[in-house]
Image (spheres, rainbow, N blue to C red):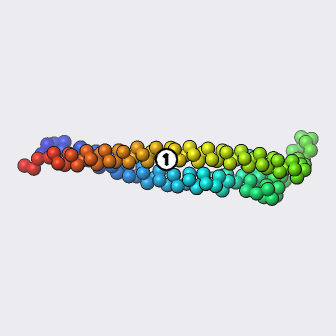
Amino acid sequence: MTRYSWIAPAYGYLVCLVAVITLLVNLSGIIDAAFDRSNPLQGRGGAFGPTGASLTSFEAFRATYNERERTAPRQTTGQAPDTLTTAQMRARYEALRADRIAQMSFSASQRLVKHGLLILVAVVLFFWHWRWLRTQRGGESTT
């Protein structure tokens, strides 16, 4: 038995272990991204627009639209409060909602591709090293 005979199997098993852990972590990421992709407004931070208003429905948007202005301290800038008609508010809501859906869908698609590629690399590394370990084990001489 040579002095370094344990290094090759240890390396092979370590790569396989890391590949399995990578697979499990990225599988969780793929599941999260798939849920975000299926319903972008209910995903991570997708329900609220840049104004802090809820984008899940028009009624929720209308109820939360000026909430930030009411809770923020008043500044004397001379600006009139934002008063919109229902049609203008609905148009703003639709634009913000479409923008948020597009952002969340792109982000979810990006995460699906990233996690999918990492899973593919982990599976290839695992099987490549597992086969290599089997050939190493078969090539050892028992003396």
Image coordinates of residue 79 in percent, x first then y, are 91, 42
Left-right relation of 12 to 107 = left
Q: Is residue 14 visible?
A: no
Which quadrant of the rendered structure holds the N terminus? Answer: top left
Residue in view at x 78 percent, y 58 percent: 60
- Residue occupied by mark 1: 115
Left-right relation of 110 to 138 = right
In-front residue for pair 20/109: 109
Q: Secondary structure at mark 1?
A: helix
Image coordinates of residue 96 in percent, x first then y, are 75, 46
Residue in view at x 72 percent, y 47 percent: 98
Residue type, mark 1 in image: His
Residue 58 quadrant: bottom right
In-front residue for pair 131/52: 131
Image coordinates of residue 120 in percent, x first then y, are 42, 46
Left-right relation of 138 to 105 = left
